Amino acid sequence: MLTVRTNSVEETRALAAAIAPVLRAGDLMILSGDLGGGKTAFSQGLAAALGITEPVTSPTFVLAQTYEGPLRLHHLDLYRLESPDEMMDLAIPELIHDRAVTVIEWGERFLEHLPLDYIQVTFGLGEIELGPDVRLIDINPAGPSWRTREEALQAATQPWKRP
């Protein structure tokens, strides 16, 4: 697991942009953390780095958004779901196998129903005395496809390593 720190919303977006080149079609990202933790800002930075030009917003009320770019992005939010059956109604398995990058906010709630190959990004509110936008972010790749990319992931996140 890698732990990094961002000091602003812009840095959170930049971190996601730095990770984007490490991603492949078919990758799954689970974004976890408190409300207001930076999940949507991270998704915005990721989308921009993937060449998506339309605005990326939180899918809390629509549950799922698809953004077209050189690499398609599915952006989902499972916060309001109460059961795995509801998750299946969103056709999440089909989206994950769509040769796109799939980002799921609050996906940890149904982790046992998702593929075993993913990267989990957990956002924590940082040291408040350093500022309200400081975030401590844990990045945990899991599964066989990430074993070959861990070195690239470490290099991409190096500028944000916690001192």
Image (cartoon, rainbow, N blue to C red):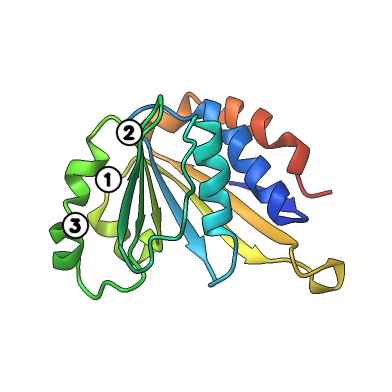
Q: Let me know if residue 4 appears in the view.
A: no
Of the numbered discs 2 and 1, the one sitting upstream in the chain is: 2
Front one among 105 and 119: 105
Of the numbered discs 3 and 1, the one sitting upstream in the chain is: 3
With respect to residue 10, does 135 lie above or below?
Answer: below
Mark 2 residue crowding within 10 angstroms, few (<14) / some (14–19) / many (20+): many
**Secondary structure of the residue carrying numbered label 1:** loop
- Residue at the image position 27 percent from the left and 58 percent from the top: 112
Residue identifier under label 2:
100
- Residue at the image position 47 percent from the left and 23 percent from the top: 148
Count of labels shown? Answer: 3
Mark 3 residue crowding within 10 angstroms, few (<14) / some (14–19) / many (20+): some
Front one among 115 and 29: 29
Mark 1 residue crowding within 10 angstroms, few (<14) / some (14–19) / many (20+): few
**Secondary structure of the residue carrying numbered label 3:** loop
Residue identifier under label 3:
90
Q: Amino acid at mark 1?
A: Pro
- Residue at the image position 28 percent from the left and 29 percent from the top: 99
Residue identifier under label 1:
115
Q: Amino acid at mark 3?
A: Leu
With respect to residue 5, does 68 lie above or below?
Answer: above
Does residue 6 appear left or right of residue 143 in this picture?
Answer: right
Front one among 4 and 18: 18
With respect to residue 137, does 96 lie above or below?
Answer: above
Q: Nearer the viewer, mark 2 or mark 1?
A: 2
- Residue at the image position 26 percent from the left and 41 percent from the top: 96
